[in-house]
């Protein structure tokens, strides 16, 4: 429910705003039309004097595959990012290209651009300064943009001359391509020269690094391995390996010699020397033992043949003794040889051990030298790799210097346009009309906001604290509105007065006020006309009515009523100079009498405050059903305040959309402060723009069938 209520309130507010705008336009349509026409005409005339310009466009396609700013897409194709394309756009607008075009076409002689040099000054002292100024003037007429999402750049140039627009658009396109090609070739050439210098430096560094490695290896005793790789070994490393093998072999030989010697000694300690294995294995001992066996066999035969004492037996025995002596000598020699061999092999082992200890001591220092050598080798390797990489880059740069490929090409040459591109006169005409409409709307809006007047029932209730009784429409010029009660009794104007009568007198027979005063805050608000029309309305409704004109300083009522002018009037009756019945004249409708002012009366006396007016009204109350008083304005005059107190009811007449709210509010406050009875207010001279504003719906065309002219 709350949502629906809020939606309804929002729709109502929107409808009120729309209605308010429509009513404002209807009220002030003439001012809106005047401002609209003035601004629109001025705009249309101004368009005729706008300078004509022509724009030509050359199209340049960028080749991503040749652009150094290109990147690789997922499918491996070259592509340019939006930032890279913006860079190319900025390159076309380069001041360098503009200066080249200034020099090429001698723009200092072109009137269209030479005017930028007018005035001179210290900033144009040199040719370079003047060239910069002309280049800036040229760039202001240039526009470069990317064509949608393509690699095509639109290079547009605007000029008062169509031929120039095409010429300079093509010049910028060609200048961009020349600049890219020249820059690429020049850059490649400079890179090639730099590479040559850098390669020479890197070659020297590589050679020095290799020499440093070789010198250090030589000093440290580090030699390359058989494989020729970078991981070399020292001389000590090469000596240790065979020495370790020799030491192992010597240790094995010493162990074997000691074993043989110990075995021989053990065998000798447990038996005859003849049982020593080493002795038995000796060839000499074996020969002597074979010889001894022959002698022993021969000795046995001789002993058997000759006996023990025979000389031959003795000789053979001497031979046997000699062989035994030789065997013993050879056995001792073999044992001595074993002992010497064991001692020599052990001495060799000790010698090899001392050599190994010395080499191991030297090897600890060589390890640190090897680490340093490896670091120098890595540095040399890195310098050689850098030299190789730089050599390849130099080769690429030299190839680029020899073959310069353009990164872009002109795909559409600019042509001189046959019609101007600006101003777009139809568009400017529409803009002038729209601007005129906006200006007119703003004017009436400002006027509406600054008016400070009363226009609706809400304004009356909020500002004055009074109920709006009715809204009396404005009639055509030259027509007396009060006469419409007679000539057109069923018109809108007549019906409005009947609404006032119903509002003041009531519709259920309650006690109605007898003396009814009509006043206004300021002059010329339709008060007198309304008073006359209201009195006629009462009379037409079969009520005996008297209209008293109390606005003695203005005295316009006799020009508004029909019939002969009076000879005496209200002033004379109050002064006692004329009888009351002589001053009261019949009106122009049955049942209406009039007590008017003969002529304008100016006096400092208190005409209505001395009691005479009160007595007069008391006398007239018994003779008439209603007495209508036309009071003077309240602002600036005192008479109206005295008279309003004497009335049973007072009606404020406010000119619609004219009377300042502050003036009307002050007047009502005075009435209340004086003790009078303001029963409501009436809008006078309401324009047709008041339709539906503040409840004045009966001004709508929907009521056309209810009102009819006679």
Image: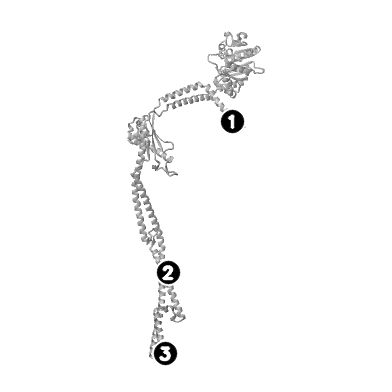
Tag in front: 3 or 1: 3
Of the numbered discs in the image, which one, if any, rests on residue 304? Answer: 3
Up the image or down, 699 lies above or below 202; here it is above
Q: What whole-number distance in Å separates the C-alpha atoms at marks 2 and 3?
A: 60 Å
Q: Which of the image's four quarters has the C terminus?
A: top right
Which image quarter: residue 491?
top right
Of the numbered discs in the image, which one, if any, rests on residue 209? Answer: none
For marks 2 and 3, the one nearer the N-term is 2
Residue beneath the point at 59% across and 30% down: 7
- Residue 681 place in picture, x, y as percent: 59, 20
Residue position marked by numbered label 2 in the rendering: 248
Tag in front: 2 or 3: 3
Up the image or down, 80 lies above or below 546; here it is below
Residue position marked by numbered label 1 in the rendering: 7
- Label 2 secondary element: helix
- Label 1 secondary element: helix
| Residue 478 visible in the displayed image | yes
Q: Which of the image's four quarters has the N terminus?
A: top right
| Residue 353 visible in the displayed image | no
Q: What whole-number distance in Å separates the C-alpha atoms at marks 2 and 1?
A: 111 Å
For marks 3 and 1, the one nearer the N-term is 1
**Count of numbered circles in the view:** 3
- Residue 283 place in picture, x, y as percent: 39, 78
Up the image or down, 222 lies above or below 418; here it is below
Residue beneath the point at 65% across and 17% down: 512
For marks 2 and 1, the one nearer the N-term is 1
Q: Are marks 3 and 1 in contact (CB under 8 Å)?
A: no
Q: Nearer the viewer, residue 647 or 299?
A: 299
Callout 1 crowding tier (Cα within 10 Å): few <14, some 14–19, many ≥20: few
- Residue 434 place in picture, x, y as percent: 47, 26
């Amino acid at each position: 429910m709350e949502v629906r209520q809020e939606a309804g309130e929002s729709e109502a507010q929107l409808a009120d705003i729309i209605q308010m705008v429509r009513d404002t336009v209807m009220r002030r349509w003439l001012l809106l039309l005047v401002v609209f026409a003035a601004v629109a005409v001025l705009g249309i005339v101004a368009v005729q004097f706008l300078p004509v310009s022509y724009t030509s466009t050359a199209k340049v396609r960028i080749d991503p595959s040749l652009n150094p700013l290109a990147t690789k897409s997922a499918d491996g194709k070259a592509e340019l990012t939006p930032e890279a394309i913006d860079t190319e756009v900025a390159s076309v607008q380069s001041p360098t290209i503009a200066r080249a075009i200034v020099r090429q076409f001698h723009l200092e002689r072109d009137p269209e651009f030479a005017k930028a040099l007018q005035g001179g000054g210290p900033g144009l002292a040199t040719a370079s300064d003047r060239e910069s100024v002309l280049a800036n003037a040229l760039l202001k007429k240039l526009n470069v943009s990317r064509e949608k999402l393509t690699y095509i750049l639109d290079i547009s140039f605007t000029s008062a001359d169509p031929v120039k627009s095409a010429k300079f658009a093509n010049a910028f396109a060609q200048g961009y391509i020349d600049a890219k090609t020249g820059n690429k070739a020049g850059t490649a050439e400079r890179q090639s020269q730099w590479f040559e210098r850098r390669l020479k430096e890197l070659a020297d560094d590589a050679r020095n690094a290799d020499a440093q490695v070789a010198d250090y290896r030589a000093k440290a005793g580090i030699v390359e391995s058989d494989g020729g790789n970078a991981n070399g070994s020292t001389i000590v490393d090469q000596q240790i390996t065979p020495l370790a093998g020799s030491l192992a072999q010597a240790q094995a030989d010493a162990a074997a010699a000691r074993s043989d010697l110990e075995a021989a000694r053990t065998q000798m300690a447990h038996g005859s020397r003849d049982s020593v294995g080493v002795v038995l294995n000796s060839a000499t001992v074996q020969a002597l033992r074979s010889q001894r066996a022959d002698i022993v066999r021969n000795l046995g035969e001789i002993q058997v043949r000759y006996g023990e004492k025979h000389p031959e037996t003795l000789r053979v025995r001497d031979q046997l003794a000699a062989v035994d002596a030789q065997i013993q000598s050879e056995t001792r020699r073999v044992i001595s040889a074993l002992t010497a061999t064991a001692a020599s092999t052990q001495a060799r082992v000790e010698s090899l051990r001392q050599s190994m200890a010395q080499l191991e001591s030297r090897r600890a220092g060589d390890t640190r030298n090897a680490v340093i050598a490896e670091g120098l080798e890595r540095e040399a390797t890195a310098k050689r790799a850098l030299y190789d990489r730089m050599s390849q880059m130099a080769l690429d740069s030299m190839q680029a210097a020899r073959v310069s490929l353009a990164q872009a090409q002109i795909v559409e040459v600019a042509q001189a346009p046959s019609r101007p591109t600006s101003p777009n006169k139809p568009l400017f005409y529409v803009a002038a009309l729209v601007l005129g409409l906006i200006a007119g709307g703003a004017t009436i809006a400002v006027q509406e906001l600054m008016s400070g007047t009363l226009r609706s029932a809400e304004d009356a209730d909020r500002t004055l604290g009074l109920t709006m009784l009715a809204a009396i429409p404005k009639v055509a010029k030259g027509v007396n509105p009060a006469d419409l009660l007679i000539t057109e009794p069923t018109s809108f104007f007549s019906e409005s007065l009947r609404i006032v009568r119903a509002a003041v007198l009531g519709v259920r027979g309650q006690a109605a006020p007898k003396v009814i005063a009509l006043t206004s805050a300021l002059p010329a608000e339709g008060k007198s006309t309304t008073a006359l029309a209201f009195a006629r309305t009462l009379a037409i409704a079969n009520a005996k009515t008297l209209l008293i004109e109390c606005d003695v300083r203005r005295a316009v009522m006799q020009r508004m009523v029909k019939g002969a002018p009076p000879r005496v009037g209200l002033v004379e009756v109050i002064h006692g100079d004329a009888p009351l019945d002589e001053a009261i004249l019949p009106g122009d409708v049955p049942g209406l009498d009039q007590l008017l002012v003969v002529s304008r009366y100016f006096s400092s006396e208190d005409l209505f405050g001395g009691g005479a007016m009160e007595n007069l009204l008391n006398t007239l109350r018994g003779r008439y059903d209603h007495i209508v008083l036309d009071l003077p304005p309240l602002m600036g005059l005192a008479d109206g305040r005295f008279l309003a107190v004497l009335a049973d009811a007072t009606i404020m007449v406010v000119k619609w959309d004219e009377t300042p709210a502050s003036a009307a509010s002050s007047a009502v406050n005075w009435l209340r402060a004086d003790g009078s009875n303001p029963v409501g207010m009436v809008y006078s001279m309401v324009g047709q723009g008041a339709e539906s504003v503040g409840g004045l719906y009966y001004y709508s065309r929907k009521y056309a069938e209810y009102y009819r002219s006679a």
